[in-house]
Image (tube, rainbow, N blue to C red):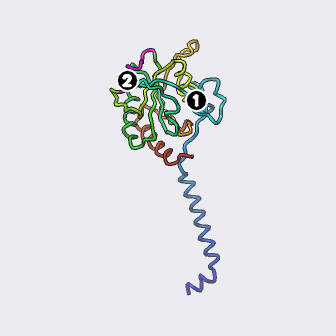
Amino acid sequence: MFFQYFKRYKYFIISFVLFSVIVLTLYYNALNPPKRLPIYSPAEVNPELVDTSIQHVKKYHTIADFSFINQYRDTITQEDFKGKVYIADFFFTTCPTICPIMTKNMSGLQKELMRFPEVKLLSHTVMPHIDSVSVIKAYGDKHGAIKDKWHLVTGNKKDIYYTARKSYMVVKTSEASELYDMVHTENFVLVDTKRRVRGYYDGTNEEEMVRLLEDIEWLIQNPNN
């Protein structure tokens, strides 16, 4: 009897089942949207952290070319990060407040990211007049920085300033009259393989480090997103 009933109403039943599957799928996706990461532009970031010349930019922002010297006296440029996902931050070795926590967390990230050779770390000093190559080398050694994995870099203060303000959008000016005085923030910046900013994370917060690791894994698995 069931088969007779099904045969009589099979098109209705099949249509109803398909409709139900579609509705349930849409409902599930609405409640559980797929993970996505934003692509940050200067117009979306706190204007205090962004150079006035680019605050109007709403899309297509990428990290500009750069050239600094790392703790091994190697010249480090954007080519060293070509096709890589990386985390950037700004610090100085004599900072008594947030830097020790940030450096500790960066060291922890380095350990977790050893299984991902396509991920690197890049820390810029904001006080190059104090943080010479030998100083950042000692600082990196103290915190376990691994060669070719975690670059600590120094260079011309003007170049560092512009990189912080125009590329990563993370540094404030302390005095309007002193163009290159920098007050660095606690931000860790996630950059994808296309040199786009994909996330900002509080480098002093361990929960934020968990979120950062999750986002890095997502970027690795979704390189074209």
Residue 115's place in the image compared with 153, above or below, is below
- Does 135 appear in magenta? yes
Amino acid carrying label 2: it is Lys
Tell me residue 136's x, y (percent): 39, 22
Residue at the extreme left of the image, as rendered = 142
- Nearer to us in this view, 16 or 99: 99
Residue at image location 50% in from the left, 44% down from the top? 219
Tell me residue 185's x, y (percent): 48, 26
Q: Which residue is mark 1?
A: 64
Residue at the extreme top of the image, as rendered = 177
Residue 9's place in the image compared with 140, above or below, is below
Q: Secondary structure at mark 1?
A: loop
- Nearer to us in this view, 204 or 16: 204
Question: Residue 109's quadrant in the figure?
Answer: top left
User: Magenta residues, as a range?
Assistant: 129-140
Residue at image location 59% in from the left, 59% down from the top? 26
Residue 3's place in the image compared with 169, above or below, is below
Give the main secondary structure of the magenta stretch: helix
Q: Which residue is mark 2?
A: 137
The tag earlier along the polypeptide, 1 or 2, is: 1
Tell me residue 193's x, y (percent): 53, 40
